[in-house]
Amino acid sequence: MQRLASSRRLLGAALAPARANSSLSAAVAAAPAVENGAAASPKMPGFDYTPPPYDGPRAEEIFRKRAEFLSPSLFHFYDRPLNIVDGKMQYLFDEDGRRYLDAFGGIATVCCGHCHPDVVEAIVNQAKRIQHSTVLYLNHAIADFAESLASKMPGDLKIVFFTNSGTEANELALMIARLYTGCNDIISLRNGYHGNAAGTMGATAQSNWKFNVVQTGVHHALNPDPYRGAFGSDGEKYARDVQEIIEFGTTGRVAGFISEAIQGVGGIVELAPGYLPAAYDIVRKAGGLCIADEVQAGVARTGSHFWGFEGHGVIPDIVTMAKGIGNGIPIGAVVTTPEIAQVLTRRSYFNTFGGNPVSTAGGHAVLKVLEKEKLQENAFVVGSYLKEQLNKLKEKHDIIGDVRGKGFLLGVELVTDREKKTPAKAEISHVMNHMKDMGVLVGKGGFYGNVFRITPPLCFTKEDSDFFIDVMDIALSKL
C-alpha cells in the first residue's frame, strides 16, 4: 500500500496539468508548443488518419491500477507516463488524440506499421474461423507460415519450431544445441541479451537483467564493440577470447555459441567486422553449433539483408526470431536443419500455443506485406539517410559520442566527455522528455542506459526522418 500511495502521489503531480486540460480537443492537444510567442516545435509530417474518440480510463486511473495489480518490476518512460490508445502505421495516439511519431516500434517489434490493414485482416479472418485448436490436428496456417519463413533462410535451414516469444525461442535453441552435441557449455557475448528465463538469463551478460539464481554452463566472451572495446574494430582479435575460453574454461568441446548480429538491448552495438566468421570457425572446430539471435536484428530491419547475420557473411546452425515476425502478435520461432531438428524426437517436445492459427496467420501476412511494400528496401534507403543525418547532429552536438547501426536498427550514444566516453545517463532522460513533448517517441538502452534506440516501423519515411532529426536537434540544444 505504501508503494501504491507513493505511485499515486508521483503520478498525481505529474498529470496535474493533463487533468486540467483533459477537455481540450484533439486538434488543440496536437498543436505545437509555443515559446516566446513563436512555435518552438518542428511540424510533424501530414497523415491522413484520425483516430476514433477515446472514452476509456485516463492515464492516472490506469497508472493506479497498474501500481495496485501489476508487478512492481514494471517501469515506464517519461516523467508523465503516456496512455497510448491508438496506432496507425508509424504513428501513435494518446488519450487526447495527440499524434506521436513512433521511432521505437514497440521495442523493434512493429515492422509493417501499427494496425497494418493486411495484417489485421489476416488475424481477424483467422480468428473468425478458428482461434485455437492444437498442433495435434492439421491446420494450413502454421504450415504456410513455416514454408514462407523457410524460404527466407539460407542453406539447409528449413525446419521451424514455433514458440510464443524470443526468450522461449532462445531457450529452445540452447537446449537443442546441448542435446545435439552432448555438451553443456555455451559461449555468449558480454553485453548481450537473450531473454529472462533460466537458460537465457545465463546467456544474457548484463547484470541489470540477471537475478541471483543458478545460471550454469555459460561463458561470456569479450564483446567485439568497436566503440568501447579493447581492440576497436579488429574482429579477429576479439575472437581469440573465444578460443581461450574453450581451451581454459571447458573440456575443449562446447555445445554452442549464441550472439546477436547487432546487440539490441545492449545499445545497438554492431559487432566488429570479421568477428562472427572467426568465432563461428573456432566454435565449430570445438564441436559446437552457432546460434544467431535475430529477435531484433532480423526480419528486414537492417535493410541491407533480411537477416542480421547475413551482413557478416555467415550461415548459422540455428536461427531464433520473434518481435518483427508478428508485427506485435506474440510469436517466436526457431529454425534449424533437418538433421539437428531430429534431437527433439528423443522425447516429447510440445508447445501449446506455438504455431497458434491466429498468430501464424498474422505472421504470414507480415512476410507478404514486407515483400509487397518493399519495406526492406525502405529500411535500407531511409535508414541510411537517417543515419547520415544523425552523424551530422554528432558534428553539431558534443554530447553525441557515437552513431551506429544499420537500416532501422540505429543507436545514438550520449556521453558527457568524448575522450573518457562518460555515459550521459541523466541527460538522455531529459532529451527523451523534450522529444516526447514535441511529438517524437524513441527508446533508450545500453548497459548504462545512455543510448537512444531508434527502431521505428519499417514504413518510416524520409519526411519522418527529417522531423525526427529536427526534434532531436532542438531537444539536445536545450541541455
Image: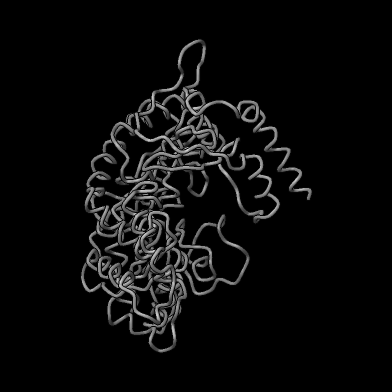
- 282 relative to 381, above or below: below
Q: Position of residue 303 (x, y in %)?
A: 26, 49
Report x, y in % for residue 64. 68, 45
- What is the tally of numbered marks visible in this picture? 0
Query: Residue lying furthest bottom in this view?
Result: 346
Q: Residue at x 50, y 71 (%)?
A: 199
Q: How is the image coloured?
A: one colour
Whether residue 155 appears in this view of the structure is: yes
- Say above or below: 2 vs 158: above
Instruction: Give the residue displayed 61% in from the left and 26% down from the top.
Output: 21
Vertical comparison of 336 with 28: above or below: below
Image side of residue 57 versus residue 329, left or right? right
**Relative depth, front residue between 41 and 194:** 41
Q: Where residue 282 sits: x, y (%)?
A: 31, 70
Query: Residue 158 lies in what quarter of the image?
Result: bottom left
x and y percentages locating residue 394 in the rendered image: 37, 31
Q: Is residue 283 at all visible to an observer of this figure?
A: no
Q: Residue furthest right?
A: 2
Furthest toward the front, the residue is: 128
Compared across the picture, whether 286 is left or right of 80 comes to left
Residue shown at the point (33%, 45%) measured from the top left: 408
